[in-house]
Amino acid sequence: MTLSLPMGMHAGMDGPHLFRINVPVKNAAGESGDVELYFKAMFR
């Protein structure tokens, strides 16, 4: 799967990176929490 995130890196920031994105969620019972998504990226 390919995910495109609108971000830029400046010179010297190439190489592997690990990003964590927290997504707030709520179920039908009204309970809420966060889902943590981790993305590995290789910038060239």
Image: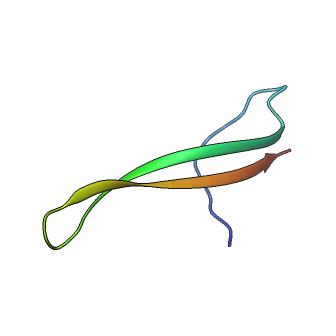
Residue 41 x, y percent position in the rendering: 74, 50
Residue 26 in the image: above or below residue 15: below
Report the side of 41 relative to 31 (left or right): right
Q: Is residue 36 above or below residue 26?
A: above
* Residue nearest the viewer, comparing 7 with 28: 28
**Left or right relative to 43: residue 4:** left
**Residue in front for this viewpoint, 31 or 11:** 31
In the image, residue 8 lies at what x, y percent? 67, 37
Residue at 71% x, 52% y is: 40
Give the quarter of the image for residue 31: bottom left
Q: Identify which residue is drawn at 13% across, 64% down.
A: 30
* Residue closest to the eye, 38 or 6: 38
Asked where in the image residue 27 lies, by quadrant, the reply is bottom left
What number of labels is visible?
0
Report the quarter where the N terminus lies: bottom right
Of all residues, the one furthest to the left in this rendering is 29
Measuring from the top left, give residue 43's x and y in whole percent.
Answer: 80, 44
Specify the quadrant that holds the C terminus. Answer: top right
Q: Nearer the viewer, residue 38 or 29?
A: 29
Residue 24 image offset from top left, x and y in percent = 32, 53
Q: How is the image coloured?
A: rainbow
Residue at 83% across / 36% down in the picture? 14
